[in-house]
Image (cartoon, coloured by chain):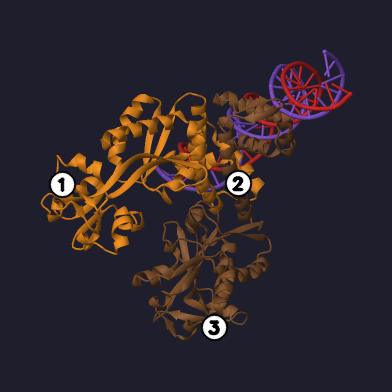
Chain colours: A brown, B orange, C purple, D red
Amino acid sequence: MIEKIHLNILREIDRQGSVTAAASSLNLTQSALSHSIKKLEHQSGTCLWLKDGRQIRLTEAGEYLLEQANRLLPQFERIDETLRQFAGNEKGSLRIGMECHPCYQWLLKVVPPFLTQSPGIDIDVKQRFQFGGMAALFNYDIDLLITPDPIQKDRMVFEAVFPYELVLVVSTTSPLGALHQIMPADLSDQTLLTYPVETARLDIFQQFLLPAKCMPRHHKTLEATDIILHMVAAGRGVAAMPRWLVSEYTDKLPLKAVRLGKNGVHKHIYVGYRKQEQQNRHLQTFISLAKNQASQLTC
Amino acid sequence: MIEKIHLNILREIDRQGSVTAAASSLNLTQSALSHSIKKLEHQSGTCLWLKDGRQIRLTEAGEYLLEQANRLLPQFERIDETLRQFAGNEKGSLRIGMECHPCYQWLLKVVPPFLTQSPGIDIDVKQRFQFGGMAALFNYDIDLLITPDPIQKDRMVFEAVFPYELVLVVSTTSPLGALHQIMPADLSDQTLLTYPVETARLDIFQQFLLPAKCMPRHHKTLEATDIILHMVAAGRGVAAMPRWLVSEYTDKLPLKAVRLGKNGVHKHIYVGYRKQEQQNRHLQTFISLAKNQASQLTC
DNA sequence: ATGTAAATATGAAAAAGTATCATTTTTTAT
DNA sequence: ATAAAAAATGATACTTTTTCATATTTACAT
């Protein structure tokens, strides 16, 4: 009944503002679109647009279809692209989702060698998800998810890419910097700076503070890693970061990393992808470069 | 490039097991399918299937397309159905998502009058979601979400349907039944029975136990409301349920409802839907019946 | 008011795309 | 080895889509 072309026409009319403009943008005549939609209207028994002066205006049903068009057409476009990749044309993109704020710095080191090694493949990074990275992976909005918190699901594969230690970053001038390890109670009079995500996803709370039923004096959230570290350096607070990340900044900023608890908080970064894409060469290229980069960071 | 018909052919071949069978099920000839896919293979430069004896077997690319077909075709079918509803044919379905276990009993009372009042509309209830009810609503997997925990999002509308009090259900033989109100510490030697969802979504934890840093002695999870209540009646544990639900069982089982804390835990059940469907008559019919049923329960 | 330009609508014909028919090729089973 | 079953292929018929030419409606300027 409803076909891709109908969705395409609706979307293009919305984008171009008129049937005539949409037609020329689709390399068709205005007449063709008019006939095409008229036929759909006839088949479905619904009006999709009304003439409003010499423009057309979408009816409620038309608006609904437009919304579906904006949802479904990108998926078709993605299928076409993937099919071309299967064909070995090796043109396409790898869409990476990041659920790990500090990993961004690390990603930036993996991207250049990837772009060299896979010349036809573009990289696209998404950091905001309506319903979490797993849902995005599941819905084919991304191809690879970078996360410290993998969820085991049937048709997904997660691989540990590298281990890291979560440490407390403090200013070199802070008395905390003198300690060899921080205990949860030591944060009771501190301002803790974190990324703006739910505390349930912050390991400093989940793995360190909450089990000891301690809380920091203040909790402020900041988007950008650099700003957080500058704030810490200026003595405005403390933050929890991977040790390797702190190491990268210690020559630029007066920062010090201190272990959390007696044994430290140890985590892994994982990459996840759809199981069926285990064979995807570009995905595997990326992952092996990622692991490689990771081993350089940890040593 | 890729068209709905291609997805349809792939899906039907998968279902029927052969091109010939798929062709007859689609009211086409075997030749038509063969030509059609051959053309797609030519355009995209990929093989989609290989001959394996006298059967055909999907290649990796074919499997990929099949998966996309199983994802996208149902969405097209839904669009067709919705368009028919717009046309006023008034045939279709209302897909309800439930994120509220005990509400099932209440839903069962709303369904019969709805089916009478909207004779052409079927009801479909989903209770399991890959990524939560909101995501399902957003992705058009359901049309209406029933939940005690609405999330404000741009294009969604949530309406409170009815207020309820969350109470502790105990056996009439339990010493707790004698109390007028339960304090968090009273549960320290009890077995708490809940539905099997994350504690973050259980109000008895979030609103009662955790703020007081108390925990029950044991925590067991059970799927079915009836079984939970039978277990409670048998003195095997206590549970948190809406007061109206307990009232419905007190004549059948030796149960007693006790207030949680001094003021009780008060909540609302909400229904949520996509804003654009505010005009949908069947949706509104359902909601008004739901509110109506709710007011009968609370009095 | 009236003419003109800009938009959509419509009918008939041309063009393109799909499906079928008849036949061939390949494979399996007896 | 042969028959039966499935898929592939090429030519033809059929259907659908697109175009062309033209009509209709509306907005705007004079």
| Crowding near the residue tagged with mark 2, few <14, some 14–19, many ≥20 C-alpha atoms within 10 Å | few
At numbered mark 1, what does the secondary structure look like: helix, strand or loop?
Answer: strand
Q: From the viewer's perspective, is residue A28 above or below residue B68? A: above
Image depth: mark 1 or mark 3 in front: 3
Q: Which chain's residue wears label 1?
A: B
Q: In which quarter of the image is residue B93?
A: top left
- State how far apart marks 1 and 3 are (Cα): 62 Å
A234 vs C1, nearest the viewer = A234
Q: In this view, does A25 lie to the left or right of D4?
A: right
* Residue assigned mark 2: A74
Q: In this view, does C5 lie above or below A116?
A: above
Distance Cα–Cα, label 2 vs label 1: 55 Å
Answer yes or no: do the residues labelled 1 and 3 have beta carbons within 8 Å?
no
Mark 1 residue type: Leu
Q: Residue at x 32, y 61 (%)?
A: B211
Whether residue B16 is visible to the viewer of this picture, yes or no, is: no
Labels 1, 3: one chain: no
Observer able to see residue B232 = yes
User: Badge 3 sits on which subunit?
Assistant: A
Residues at badges 2 and 3 in contact (C-beta under 8 Å)?
no
Badge 3: how crowded within 10 Å, few (<14), some, or many (20+)?
some
Tell me which amino acid carries mark 3.
Answer: Thr
Residue at image mark 3: A172
- Quadrant for the C terminus of chain A, please: bottom right
Q: Mark 1 points at which residue?
A: B255
Taking depth in this image into account, of B217 and D11 the one nearest to the observer is B217
Q: Is D27 on the left or on the right of D17, as rendered?
A: right
Of labels 2 and 3, earlier in sequence is 2
Task: Tell me where residue B33 appears, x and y as whole percent.
Answer: 56, 38
